Image (spheres, coloured by chain):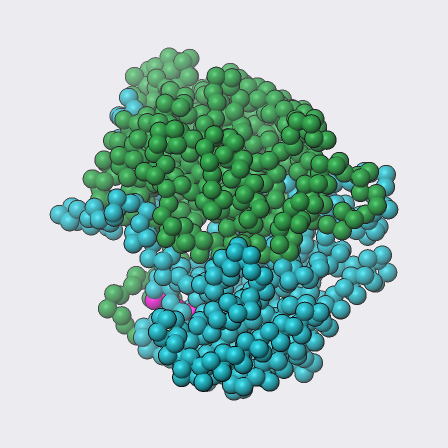
Chain colours: A green, B cyan
Amino acid sequence: MTSPDAPSTSANNGVAKARRAPLAIDNINRRVIDSEYAVRGEIVQLATKIARDIEDGKGSYPFDKVVWCNIGNPQILGQKPITYFRQVLALCECPQLLSHPNIRELFPEDVIARAQLLSKAIPGGLGAYSESAGALIIRQLVAASIARRDGYPADPDNIYMTDGASPAVHYMMDLLLRDRSDAMMVPIPQYPLYSATLTLYGGTLAPYLLDEQNGWGLDVGHLREQLADARSRGLCVRAMVVINPGNPTGQCLSYQNMRDVLTFCRDEQLVLIADEVYQANIYVGNKEFFSFKKVAAAMGLLDQVPLVSLHSISKGFVGECGRRGGYMEVTGFPEAVKDQILKLASINLCPNLSGQICCALMMNPPQVGEASYELYRAEKSAILGSLKRRAELLVGALNRLEGVRCNAAEGALYAFPRIMLPEAAVQAAKKIGKQPDWLYCRELLEATGIVVVPGSGFGQADGTFHFRTTFLPSEEDIGLVVEALSAFHAGFLQRYGGLRKAGSVVLDGAAAVAAAPAGPVEAGSKNGAAAH
Amino acid sequence: MVRKEAMRMVSALFRAGNQGISASWSVGGTRLKSAMPEPSQPKDEDLHAKDGKVLHPHLLNENVVKTQYAVRGELYLRAEQLRKEGKEIIFTNVGNPHALGAKPLTFPRQVLALCAAPFLLDHPRVEEMFPADVIARAKKTLAAFKGGVGAYTDSRGNPMVREEVARFIEKRDGVSSNPDHIFLTDGASVAVRLCLNAMIRHERDAVLVPIPQYPLYSASIRLYGGTLVGYFLDERRGWGLSIEELRRSLAEAREEGKLVRGLVFINPGNPTGQCLSQENLKELIQFAYEERIVLMADEVYQENVYQDERPFVSAKKVMYDMGEPYRSHVELLSFHTVSKGTAGECGLRGGYVEMTNIHPGAIEEVYKCASINLSPNTMGQIALSCLVNPPKPGDPSYELYTKEKASELVSLRRRAHMVTDGFNSLEGVTCNFTEGAMYSFPQIKLPAKALEAAAAAGKAGDVFYCLKLLEATGISTVPGSGFGQEEGTFHLRTTILPREEVMTSFVEKFEKFHKDFMKQYS
């Protein structure tokens, strides 16, 4: 019964003896328990309960609905799907409609043609497993559109369709992480998918900081320091994650910055995981999305830097989160490694076909001259235009709040404001064993029904506090959100003694020096006594 | 500035873990200190890159590399290659009915189309194109899916659908079912993997799996770093499951220091097609109770039953019928899917797991893991909704729906007989009847010469046979070695899914190949 490599105590607890449950909280996989996923964490669970109470007419809350700003889930907040995508999908989902005599009254010609093409080219239609990497026609369509986007060829055999972009991250973690001394460089703040999967697959997160004072910029000198630091701890750093446009931080990388990152990855022999799911969400005129693939190709580095590019139908102006569609393109990967990815994909048989089709449509929208083009163009620009207005409105309003500073949301779907909190709030949080920004977010939920995610779920510099909110509530609603948030914020500061009193600001000694200049200008001076 | 902040930051990350206010990376960080090699043994650079490649096959996660997945293994890849070269391939390697011409059930697809394109509901001619109950169902579904099918749902799946699944289970089993213990997933495979990931902590943790088995289990257990402990099904007794064999296998595993955490059984069997008797299920449940093992009931073929002596009975029903202490103590995970049955909606990826007597804390953890992938796809959820809550007598779609299902089921039963009879008529081939599921798993006695030729080609005997079959006929099957088989025996798995109109020629092709093969190697 005993084995030489005696396992931990918790493992011994699992031995089947008298009436001990084989499956209990203290004897399941530790890595599962240790994974945290703030975007759907405790606050979201509380919000779910409140939403259910309101629906059932139970409990009493000072608001009549929950506003889900915790997650980039546009359609739940009223964003309409793009008509063309849904028309084609409906015909693929119910192909018998194609032979209905009235079909042309209900669907434009290009929609019918596209659905016919896809139904014919996907063996067995939507109800059959496709190849595990995705149906060939879908991968061909995606590859062709990547080639158009970048001006460099893309190979369908380098494309793996996925149920949303998240499975691609799982594949990479599973492939690359052998034990806890294998690490990945991840930006801080980060999208918690990365920290959660790193824990789940038993690796280590090697952080690099985005620079809040410089619009959440990515500094390559800092990357080198962080890498050296990780290596000096005995970590084997295998890959670097870049999220561009950033989540939760919304910044867009410049072309030169991307070149530097690629050179860094080449010099240091790192796999580059480029999370590019927000590539269609850019709201500032002086920024443009470049894919890492394009920049790497232009630099002649495609063979030297193994690169994974992720994309999804959940974001952009498409917002088809529920469909679960996405892809990853890998370049510079040896064939033997690609075989391993294919094997991993095959254990789940295949990604869902509706998601695959939607992804192919997103990448190959109607063209000028086709029947659906005008409507498509109008819907797309309406959504993107509105997102831009909402981003500006929200960020502007946040910056008017006392003790709050927020960088412009250049891209993606989020604002990530920094908030100064009164000392009493910090103490109150400590008393219940929570982070101060968690306390802020929970009280915000309870007072207004607005669900946001505490900055501690994404990672933040010590002593600083943030939260992430989407700017996805509709244009009618976002004004109300801003109003409710502003009123709550003022009340919160008041309730916990305010920011003004000397010695009341929340900065511990070390953090105060570094963080004060980053704080809101007025707060910085008002809190001077404490900060300096 | 950046540097100073960074250093503070990093130290903060590691400190956070000690203070118990950790985000996940700090957990990794604190562990790091103990897990790290001593500074005197710097990490070998060879661990990072080889032949100038970071992504070198030798430097990948060993669990990934060692994982085998036969259903899409060597044979499948060769078949894909031949198809690309223009050869007509009959894909009987995987239970994928629509790929072989099965038609989708009309009702679910009509509902899906209206949910995908809700604007059709406002079209003046919608009633000419869709039956009234389809329209009503689509409206009800859209009302229950906040934000429509384009929004993430709860990570466990939409509450209305989970409720419908619970009612389906209650109706099937006559016992209560709690929707909060039902998780919807992208096909049953995802559900199986979620559960295994939570159960398996290290190599010592073991799961009992039938041999032959469906390779999802061997692959996932390997991937999560656990140990598979096989128990043999008895081919001579119609692939029966014997408790003595289970006890033998369990004792052996414990002897080796394994902690046996789970027991998988597949009913009806895959690839073996047997249906378990109520008596047999009782023994299993008692065994799980006495030995404190989680029962994992793969019941995805519950609708696919082709004999009348042993209709499908769920493990849950049997367990409840046994009364205490079993009904409140045996930890049971039951899996189901939209991919099988008469719907065969493989590509939509819908399925669920129901967890009975599972610790609430463990359910919470599974919920969290599900949330890392946000939510199961909505189309799969809606397809599941339609299948567990189908049209009722009197509804406009009822007759067509019932007819479509019945005719597919009757046809599958005929095909099960055709395939079994075909195999049994061949020299050197014996085959148990496909009582259920979608597969036939004949044993093939390979002549010595064939085994020599296989060895010379560096292949296992059954792999050799299946490759020859593929090259000669285009029939793509899976060698028995991918499922596990008693040493010295050779099998292959084929589905019974070719359509009836081509089944005769399918059987003939097989017969001709087999005769030629035997002649060549006798």
* Quadrant for the C terminus of chain A in the image: top left
Query: Compared to A300, does B182 lie above or below?
Result: below
In the displayed structure image, the side of residue B197 where residue A135 appears, left or right: right
Residue under the point 40% across and 13% down = A521
First to last magenta residue range = B204-208
Report the front residue among B207 and A454.
B207
Q: x and y percent of residue A453 in the render?
A: 49, 35
Residue under the point 38% across and 20% down = A214
Report the front residue among A261 and A140.
A140
- Quick check: is B200 in the magenta stretch? no
Q: x and y percent of residue B291 in the render?
A: 44, 76
- In the picture as drawn, the residue positioned furthest to the left comes out as B40
Magenta-highlighted stretch: main secondary structure?
strand
Query: Compared to B112, does B287 lie above or below?
Result: below
Report the front residue among A33 and B91.
B91
Query: Compared to A79, does A402 lie above or below?
Result: above
| Residue B160 visible | yes
